[in-house]
Image (cartoon, helix red, strand yellow):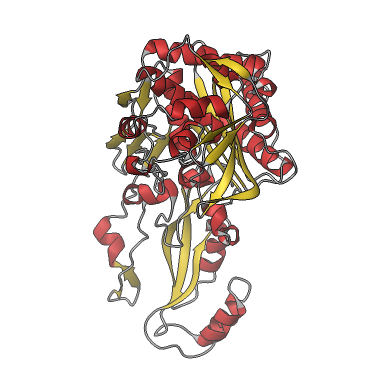
Amino acid sequence: MAHSVPSYSFFVDPKFWNTSNSGKLEKFVPDKVVKDLSRNLPGRFFPVLRKVGIERADMIMDLNLPGLYSVSEKQRLYPNKTLLAHILGFCNIDDHGQSGLELLWDSVLYSPPETKILVKDPSGQRVNLADIATNKRQDKNADVNLTVDSTLQYIIENRLEEGALLNRAKWAAAICMDPETGAILSMASWPFYDPNRRNTFNREDHLLNNAIGRVYEPGSTFKPIIMGLSLEKRLVNRNEYFMCAQRIRVADKVVSDPKAYGKLTLDQLIIKSSNVGMSQIGIRFNPFDTYNSLISWGFGNKPGIELPGAEKGLLPPPDQWRGVVPANIAIGQGIAVTPLQLITAISAIANGGHLLKPFIVNSVRDSSGTLVYKGSRTEVATVISTETANWLRSVLREVVLKGTGTLVNTELVPIAGKTGTAQVARKGIYEKGKWVSSFVGFWPHETPQFSMLIVIGEPSKGKYYGSTVAGPVFRNIVEDMYRIEKTGLVLERE
């Protein structure tokens, strides 16, 4: 995904440089440099070219111009261009990491350029003492090995961009995780950028890794988590039901549904995604107890993944849980999360109740081949019982079969999950017509091997429900994965 290739940089020592030779470099260097080389230069060092490929460097060296010297370096290349760019990050001209894994593991990955110490021997020949001192050793490259599946990454980036463009979205994110280990199998953030092309760095929002750095209100994708902790704290029981009018007043605010659902059982609250019913659970919360439960689920904390820039979200302290706040939190409002936090929490439902620390680095070896880091399954907490997790998995399957997530259903593999549609809040005020659409789920639903979250931020083409915007993207990815696994077909990237 990222590797270094040999390159050369050139400089002139003005003491030995003949200005009449400047014209011989015209086809290799900018006009300004040629002009500078045509006059007498001060000092003993003047940079000419940086990071030139071997073929072009050989042509320059063949000119054999006195006073022009080369230094061997390495140049960072990303052969798959935009693929996995937000995770890999990029380097500056000196090959020091500036973002992503390049920044986090710079101490291991950085390869210093060649050093030259030039002197004249008795015959007048120039000798590089640094080459003699180091015996021209060739260091082995360091290696950072990821948990990411490159084929899956390819599929997800294609489908995520397709969904974002189709709905004229402002941003998008996708994460696929192994719920049994916490290993990240794919992580994508849109808009993309190409780390090989620095002109694509112009927009700061393109460089943001939305999967770990974007904080948003999760809406109804948060309801399974609220239901799980409410069952564990015995705030609800599976046999009770809730009367769900179209609207309910909580303190000085009104919580509403698209229509009056009437009497709903506990599972139907999730299947139909009733705000009115879930808000009735919210007003039962003990603020301090529920706050601590959400902390144990990973909210309000940084997730500990091996990537810089991971945000901790926004979980209001319990002394602020007054009025409508508990009801809002129960429906995924008044709390802000990152996509990584949410998929990690949903994976705890998929795996039987265990919150795992997400990891994306499988192993790291330094230039000597020594293992310096090994990623592995790390359990943070047991957040729900196996019984509760099994019940939630069956309910989330019903969401896809006959609830708000029917557009995600496919005959290829049984999917379970939850839709989410949340308003966008800025400075404490919800903006009219601004939404975040999402779908989170796992498959196969009884013994999940994959969990995944799709988030489409601020779609502007009319549709905005998670079921119609994010749901089809989720289904398309699952079907692409299934067909490739079964038939070996390869998708073409446009």
Q: Residue furthest bottom?
A: 40
Q: Is residue 316 left or right of residue 249?
A: left
Q: Where does residue 292 sit, x and y in percent of width and height?
A: 31, 33
Q: Where does residue 47 sit, x and y in percent of width and height?
A: 45, 75
The quarter of the image holding the C terminus is top right
Q: Which residue lies furthest to the left in this view?
A: 133
Q: Where does residue 155 sit, x and y in percent of width and height?
A: 62, 32
The residue at the point 42 percent across, 17 percent down is 236
Q: Is residue 82 left or right of residue 378?
A: right
Q: 463 or 10, which is in the foreground?
A: 463
In the rendered view, tell whether residue 135 sits above or below residue 346. Answer: below
Q: Can residue 445 be seen in this view?
A: no
Q: Toward which corner of the image does residue 379 lie, by quadrant?
A: top left
Q: 471 or 103, which is in the foreground?
A: 471
Q: Where does residue 409 sit, x and y in percent of width and height?
A: 66, 18
In the rendered view, tell whether residue 463 sits above or below residue 116. Answer: above
In the rendered view, tell whether residue 16 sits above or below residue 291. Answer: below
The residue at the point 24 percent across, 60 percent down is 133
Q: In this view, does 361 lie to the left or right of 247?
A: left
In the rendered view, tell whether residue 306 sits above or below residue 106. Answer: above
The residue at the point 61 percent across, 51 percent down is 431
Q: Is residue 311 visible?
A: yes
Q: Toward which corner of the image does residue 73 lie, by quadrant?
A: bottom left
Q: 400 or 7, which is in the foreground?
A: 400
Q: 134 or 391, which is in the foreground?
A: 391
Q: How many labels does the image show?
A: 0
